Image (cartoon, rainbow, N blue to C red):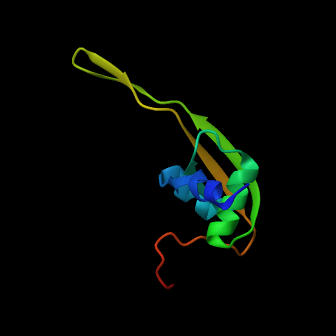
């Protein structure tokens, strides 16, 4: 895999109630990733960008919701998220501040 592909695999961190709960309980982080990204690519991208050791990767394909506005109907796009379990003692700081 080339470095350019690894830089594009991660779309953004996914912040929700569930993602903060799994971060606290089981040392996991959640990212939105490209729909065609594979687990080894995701693991290498996180290890390269954040200098952490990833132990396990789980992916979930999320279906877009159907939405309606008056007589118009539409659909939000499908997307993919990845749950990454980090090695004990490892952490990713998204805020970038000193602690």
Measured from the top left, where is residue 89 in percent x and y? 71, 75
Q: Is residue 44 placed above or below 94 in the rendered structure?
A: above
Query: Seen from this angle, which residue lies furthest left?
Result: 70
Measured from the top left, where is residue 20 in percent x and y? 53, 58
Residue 4 appears in the rendering: yes
Q: Is residue 78 placed above or below 74 in the rendered structure?
A: below
Residue at image point 67% right, 43% down: 59
Left or right relative to 70: residue 85? right
Residue at image point 64% right, 39% down: 36
Residue at image point 54% right, 50% down: 18
Q: Nearer the viewer, residue 12 or 4?
A: 4
Measured from the top left, where is residue 32 in percent x and y? 54, 49
Which quadrant would residue 1 be assigned to in this image?
bottom right
Total count of labels: 0
Residue 91 appears in the rendering: no
Q: Is residue 71 placed above or below 29 in the rendered structure?
A: above
Which quadrant would residue 46 be assigned to in this image?
bottom right
Left or right relative to 66: residue 5? right
Left or right relative to 49: residue 94? left
Measured from the top left, where is residue 11 in percent x and y? 52, 52
Left or right relative to 95: residue 81? right
Query: Seen from this angle, which residue lies furthest bottom?
Result: 98
């Amino acid at each position: 895999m080339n470095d350019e592909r690894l830089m594009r695999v991660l779309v953004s961190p996914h912040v929700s109630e569930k993602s903060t709960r799994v971060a606290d309980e089981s040392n996991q982080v959640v990212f939105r990733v490209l729909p065609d990204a594979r687990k080894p690519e995701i693991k290498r991208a996180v290890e390269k960008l954040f200098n952490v050791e990833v132990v396990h990767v789980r992916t979930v394909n999320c279906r877009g919701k159907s939405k309606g506005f008056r007589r118009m109907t539409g659909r939000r796009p499908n997307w993919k998220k990845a749950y990454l379990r980090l090695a004990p003692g490892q952490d990713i700081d998204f805020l970038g501040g000193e602690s």
